[in-house]
Amino acid sequence: MKFKNRTIKKSTILLIIFGLFLFYIISGFYNPLTVTEYSYTSSKVPAGFDGFRITQISDFHCKDFGKQEDKLIQAIRDTNPDIIVFTGDSIDDEHPIDNYAYLLEGIKDIAPIYYINGNHEYDKLAPLEESLALHKKYNVIDMNDYSVVLRRNGDSILLSGLDFRLTMMNLRNDIDYANTSYFNILLYHGTDKFDGIAPYNYDLVLSGHTHGGIICLPFIGGIINNRKEFFPKYDSGIFTVGQSTMISSRGLGDADVPRFHNPREVVCITLHSAASESPK
C-alpha cells in the first residue's frame, strides 16, 4: 500500500513538472507590447534637462499593433516624451509601409521625431523612397551622420546620429569623437558595434538591431542574434564601457527565428541631473 501511494505521488509530481514545462514553452511565444522605463542620472546632464524624456522605437519592421497602430501610438503617448527617436529598421522588404504611415500620423503631434537608418532600410526591395516621403510629410528629422543641438530651460545637449554601417572599419571612417562641450546622445542601430563606439566617449548611446537576443532564457538572457550568432554580448538593457553607456532595445518586430520570452518593447529614458553618474 505504501509502495502504491509513493508511485502515485511520483506520477503526480512528474505530471505537474511536465505541465509547468509545457506552460513555459507555450507562454514563451506570447510576447506582448511593453514599455521599459530607464532613469539615466549624471552630473553631465545640465539642470535644464532634468526630467527630459526620450522615447525610443527600434526595429519596428512595420509590424501591426492594433487598428492602424492604435496600441503602439497610445503606448508612445503614455510615455509623455519630449522627443521620439527611431533607431533603425523601421521598414524592411517583407512588409508594406502602411503601418509606418499610420504610426507617424498618430505620433506626429506628440513630440519632435528623429530617425536613423538600420540595415533593413537598405534591403533591395525596401520602400526607402516612400519612407523618406513620409518623413518629409510628418517633419521627421533625418539624423543619419548629423548632429543637432537640443535646447531646454536655457541649457543645451547634443543629439547625434550615424547611418548604418556593416563593419566597424567603415564606421570609424565617419564617427567623430563626442563634443565634450555638451552632454552627448548618439543614435546608432547596431548594438553589436558598442565596443567600437565606446572609445568615442558618447555619454549615452541608443541602439537596437539584436532584437533582445530573440530567444531568451532565465539567468542567461538572449541566446541568438539576427545573424544567428549565439550569445550576443549586448542583447538588451543597459551596458557601460568606459565613459559610455548604451541602452539596447529589444525592439518591436520579428526575425527569422520566433521571439521566445522576449516581449516587444518601447523604451523610455528619463534624464536626471545630479552628482551621481550611474544609470538605473
Image (cartoon, helix red, strand yellow):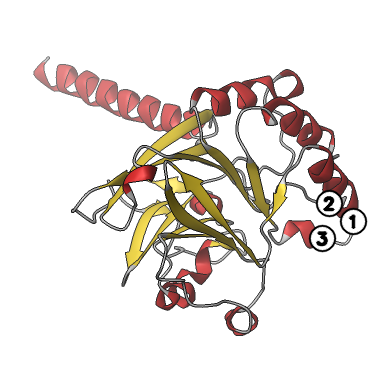
Label 2: how many Cα within 10 Å (few below 14, some 14–19, many 20+): some
**Label 3 sits on what residue type?**
Asp
Measure the C-alpha gap from mark 2 to mark 3.
6 Å
- Label 2's element? loop
Depth check, front residue: 109 or 56: 109
- Label 3's element? loop
User: Sequence-wise, which precedes: disc 2 or disc 1?
Assistant: 2
Q: Is residue 164 left or right of residue 9?
A: right
Q: Pointer 3 and pointer 1: residues touching (CB < 8 Å)? A: yes
The residue that label 3 is drawn on is 123
Label 1: how many Cα within 10 Å (few below 14, some 14–19, many 20+): few
Q: Is residue 218 visible?
A: no
Measure the C-alpha gap from mark 2 to mark 1.
5 Å
* Residue 199, image quadrant: bottom left
Q: Pointer 2 and pointer 3: residues touching (CB < 8 Å)? A: yes
**Label 1 sits on what residue type?**
Leu
Q: Is residue 74 visible?
A: yes
- Label 1's element? loop
The residue that label 1 is drawn on is 125
Residue 161 location (% of width, % of height):
60, 62
The residue that label 2 is drawn on is 93
Q: How many marks?
A: 3
User: Can you say which quadrant of the picture contains the N terminus?
Assistant: top left
**Label 2 sits on what residue type?**
Asp
Residue 213 location (% of width, % of height):
50, 53
Measure the C-alpha gap from mark 3 to mark 1.
6 Å
Depth check, front residue: 246 or 174: 174
> Which residue is the extreme one toward the left?
2
Q: Pointer 2 and pointer 1: residues touching (CB < 8 Å)? A: yes
Depth check, front residue: 213 or 104: 104
Residue 146 location (% of width, % of height):
65, 64
